[in-house]
Amino acid sequence: MAERMLKFVTAPKAMPEKRAAEVRRHGFREIYEEFAREKAAEQAARCSQCGVPFCQIHCPLQNNIPDWLKLTAEGRLEEAYELASATNNMPEICGRICPQDRLCEGNCVIEKGFESVTIGTVERFITENAWEQGWVRPPKPRRERPESVGIVGAGPAGMAAAEQLRRKGYQVHVYDRYDRIGGLLIYGIPSFKLEKSVVERRGKLLADGGITFHLNFEVGRDATLGDLRARHDAMLIATGVYAARDLMVPGVGLGNVHPALDYLIASNRKGLGDAVPAFEDGTLNAAGKHVVVIGGGDTAMDCVRTAVRQGAKSVKCLYRRDRANMPGSLREVKHAEEEGGEFVWLAAPEALLGDGEVRAVRAVRMHLGLPDATGRQAPEPVEGSHFTVDADMVVKALGFDPEDLPTLFGCPELALTRWGTVKADLRTGMTNLEGVFAAGDIVRGASLVVWAIRDGRDVAESIDRYIRGKGENAMALAS
Ligand SMILES: Cc1cc2nc3c(=O)[nH]c(=O)nc-3n(C[C@H](O)[C@H](O)[C@H](O)COP(=O)(O)OP(=O)(O)OC[C@H]3O[C@@H](n4cnc5c(N)ncnc54)[C@H](O)[C@@H]3O)c2cc1C
Ligand code: SF4
């Protein structure tokens, strides 16, 4: 082992080639190229096989990172893929969009002085290579089971659960109100972070494995939760969180003020080749406009970078805390700045100004005061520090809350937490309704893809135990 590994002393950290910001600004392709095989092996060999793999401990999926790095360094790529996919239903997606700087790579023990192993890009390389070689196969159970499971939501939580349940032989039906599979992977996250063909390929694999997708099917409109419970032996709610938090300032009702997801969905649909009237008539197109994005998370960053690519005259992001205290990934801030987005830190909007249409944002400078109950420093306005920013378009990216599912689903008895998320047993994922489980953002609140996959996998185990338990009880009663 020692011969091949421990190369962090001699081989510096390297990422795949990143296209120049000037080129990136004009298109929606992913910004990194693929690693060549030798480069992936070299970078994997930087791992010291440290014996205390904090990378693995800090991965929500507990991916066996040290072992697949070693196999990659040795050129044993099929085994590396088998290992990477044993704990993750979409390693090529996590390799692209996980905030590795906060998870595996941020905790790699060789980081100090030598910089971490580039785990995400090696993970992406292993899985892309597996797709090319035909090693990624649809879920095919050894034996079919008669029981069926209904899943509401074809995002990463629903997709992961569907695949795991199908592998066990269940008849799996996934219902989604969108016309495509992927949830936020397809319509939220822009293609410069995750190209849509990568998501479509995964969706097709699940359908090829016998999972039935009912698209354009909105639970609440096309069926109640009760109707679906009557059709299936168990149900999973994996609907994500979609109620956009609003800006509470005067002028928010002016024209050209848009919720972030409307803006991103329009852009993603356009990229997928759909007709998008609100984009074509200019409403949701930033071309030639002064754009102000309000918020400091990943969604805000995605809006900034989308507006740059659409040819905005200027793009400013207003955030009330500073760079160190923003929730979004610092890696993404760097990309956005390189591409020409401007961050106005410690600034909060006070009013949107205009006459029918928005023309400017009046903002105030903030400073960070004492920590609040959550431990974060509370931003406070600096008196007399008002300023105005030109804006022909404002995008509100202030985060998401859960929708009112009991009302929407025609199921008032579904229990919620005080945050409006679905209340699910921490151990089993079951809600207060017998045989109805929940997973992903709708339980956790807005989170990460990797957590949605983890939750989907865990809840699939619980659903399997639940259905088998029901069968055993029925047999015991009959005997
Ligand atoms: C703009 C943006 C960028 C992001 N970037 C990143 C990133 O870079 N990295 C990262 O790890 N995470 C990122 N996230 C977060 C990540 O996308 C989510 O945490 C993850 O998608 C949650 O998965 P989920 O399956 O729980 O829900 P979702 O992905 O939201 O999927 C839920 C699905 O349920 C469907 N649905 C909802 N209600 C109904 C209904 N009544 N009937 C039928 N179907 C319904 C929806 O149509 C959707 O397809 C980002 C989020 C956003 C908004
Ligand atoms: S923490 Fe770093 S050095 Fe240790 S096993 Fe993980 S990648 Fe290798």
Image: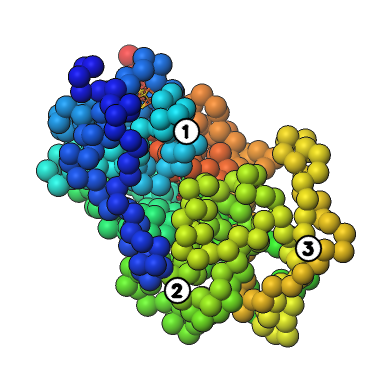
- The residue shown at (21%, 34%) is 41
Disc 3 marks a residue whose amino acid type is Val
Residue 361 image offset from top left, x and y in percent? 71, 72
Front residue of 475 and 34: 34
Q: Along the horizontal axis of the image, is 422 left or right of 225?
A: right
Whether tag 3 and tag 1 are in contact, CB under 8 A, the answer is no
Q: Is residue 294 left or right of residue 87?
A: right
Q: Earlier in the sequence, mark 3 or mark 1?
A: 1
The mark found on residue 445 in the picture is none
Residue visible at 25% across and 23% down? Answer: 5
Q: Secondary structure at mark 2?
A: helix
The residue identified by callout 3 is 364
Instruction: Give residue 310's mark.
Output: 2
Query: From the Cβ of disc 1, is ligand 2 less than 8 Å away?
Result: no
Evaluate if marks 2 and 3 touch, with contact meaning CB atoms under 8 Å apart: no
Q: Earlier in the sequence, mark 1 or mark 2?
A: 1
Residue located 77% across and 59% down the image: 365
Which label was assigned to residue 106? 1
In-front residue for pair 39/332: 39
Q: Position of residue 103 (x, y in %)?
A: 46, 34
